[in-house]
Amino acid sequence: MNPALLDSLDKDARVVIAGITGQYARDQTRTMVEFGMNVVAGAAPGRAGQVVWGVPVFDALAETADLCPTIAIVYVSAARVAAVAREAMDLGVKLLVIAAEGVPLHDTMRLRAEAVRRGCCIVGPNTVGLLRPGRCLAGSLVPDFARPGPVCVLSRSGTLSIQIVSLLSRSGIGQSLCVAVGGDRVVGSTPAEWLQVAEADPSTRAVVLIGEVGGQKEYQAAEVIETMSKPVVAYIAGRSAPQDTPMGHVGAVVREYRDTAAAKISALESAGATVSPTLWDVPGIVAGLLEEAR
Amino acid sequence: MRLFEAEAKALLQEHGVAVPFGVWVTEETQLLDALATVGRPAMLKAQVLSGGRHKDGLIRALAESDPDATAVQFFRRVVGGRDPCAGVLVERRVEHSGEMYLLLDVDDLSGDIRCWTSASGGVDIEQNAGDLREAHFPADEPAPRERILASLDPRLAAPAAAAAADAAAALVSAMRGCDAEIVEINPLGLTNGTAMVLDAKVTIDDNATYRQQIPAPSLSPRAANVRRSADALSERAHVAGLTYLPLDGDIALLSMGAGFGMAVMDLVAEHGGRLANFIDTSGGVSVNAVRELADIVLCRAREVGARSIIISFVIAASSLRNVIEGIVAALSDHPERPPIFSTFNAGAAATVSMSYDEAVEWLESAGVHVSPDLPDTVSAAVACGFQSAR
């Protein structure tokens, strides 16, 4: 992923929203418009001519090409994601946020491969998106829980990203960037890729990484953490998760020791991260590290 | 969804993979007709979802000389046994001179298909795991036969390696076509330059079953019985589209969001408690959906004699009113219950329908102790002994 991506993620970005007429998407559109995002168009089949919170609606994303969108947010149902996401990539967007839960695995695998080739960054599926407090909102993260500051938050879980942003803000710690990469087994961009962005981002001084049991993403992240100059505080959800049982997220399942929180914590600590025993201890640890770095 | 062997082979065959001729029977009355159609020698294979069938006596070879009664006895033993069984696959026995192991799965980082092979297959593959060789193939391109061939164990004889590479290429294509998460072939039978799938374990992506053809015997009552959840609450949750896990603790949890639920579970453990369940929603939060979620949690609390219940959630834009109305409606159906402690968080979009303070009032009126701090809530829930709230 190109770290320069962040430069294009601000209120001047031209945002299009697929599936804009559904109730959830309407609510999110309102939040993004009130945040100050430049939402130039929405799309929903058969709804051309409607207006959602001041945003004109077209029948398909392809009809918004003249508006030169740079960010697409996809709120369509899981079965339609593959087709609509390709339509968004055809527009040349730099960031594509896919909210839907339940996208077929092979659809995501193909979309990821295609996005890598085309230089498009996908966040999701199964995500609440990306937030740069005061600068950019692409998705369903809660801007009123956030405040600008020096900490980048990366999380596999949507609810945990919302919660940690809230906890950090209440402790007086603001955020530079928050990305919920998505709860599915395969996602468009991994925490490790976003760690490289955070390392290069001058507004980030520390990173909070929220991982989960299951899969390899935290090991890939550990390899990047070893090379980073900025401190990383990690929390792995599911320390007490039972074996062989998917914990809600498709990817969160302990099948072997490598999948456990204990194994991941060990790898992250070896790489230099400070691991927090619970989510609620994270702000205190971050505050200490920021103080040390002064 | 984990497939029965017979389902897996039918799907693989549709995608051009060679499998032995076979007939799946779910009723004893179909057995002898199937045997006559398949011919002898045959293999009788119990259709169960657990592994280790050879070791458990759930596979039997039927020779030319074996009487029909042998097949009938096998059917009665496996189908009438203690563990649910979805019938028997009657399959033509395939003679082969060599065996290998092949596993296709998904690399969760790159999204590539990974192909793992071993020149030695069979029931002891776990002891030979060190021999596994790995190759990666992009998700949206065909797997080149030459690359598969290069990835195989060089000890394989040329005709066998060529046949295995052809089979692996077909299996990669089938994996995509079937929306499979895992395809495990053990063994792949090799004879005179041909390869045939002798046993297959395939797991289909639950999110893609809507676009896959499921063979008719899968819909039989026996197959449904094998797949049915072991307990009534799990089955109810499955029907409602919820992830529900009964756990062995005595604090029931109502939460929404998988990651958040796991974090609460960890926090409870950190305070010395153990949860009686994990639960997660997917999709929207209508009043009725939340009521069903809450009712399942309250039933679980009653089932285990829970000492307390924790209600905790974070919502960005879902309607807080829907969530609170659903919870309160379920609580009204369960007047006898242990103490309930709650902490929740809702973004501005969520509170358009109901303010945070109003939600607190609703919950407190229903007898729920609300605190703004989740560690305090968990601490109280762990500390309290069982007593009825009313």
Image: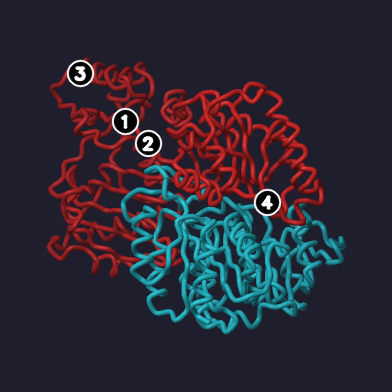
Chain colours: A cyan, B red
Q: Earlier in the sequence, mark 1 or mark 3?
A: 3
Chain of the residue displaying label 3 = B
Instruction: Tell me the distance, in whole angstroms, between the alpha carbons under discs 2 and 4.
Output: 43 Å
Give the amino acid at mark 1. Leu
Tell me the residue at 12%/62% (across/down): B155
Tell me the residue at 74%/46% (across/down): B320
* Residue B217 spot, x, y in % from top left: 44, 29
Is residue A45 at all visible to an observer of this figure?
Answer: no
The residue tagged 1 is B89
Tell me the residue at 44%/63% (across/down): B111
Chain of the residue displaying label 4 = B
Residue B345: which disc? 4
Q: Nearer the viewer, residue A290 or B156?
A: A290
The residue tagged 3 is B70
Residue B4: which disc? 2
Chain of the residue displaying label 1 = B
Instruction: Tell me the distance, in whole angstroms, between the alpha carbons under discs 2 and 1.
Output: 10 Å
Q: Earlier in the sequence, mark 2 or mark 3?
A: 2
Check if mark 2's residue and mark 1's residue have beta carbons within 8 Å.
Answer: yes
Give the amino acid at mark 4. Asn
Is residue B306 at all visible to an observer of this figure?
Answer: yes
Disc 3 versus disc 4: nearer the observer: 4
The quadrant in which the N terminus of chain B is found is top left
Q: Quadrant of residue B133?
A: bottom left
Q: Earlier in the sequence, mark 2 or mark 4?
A: 2
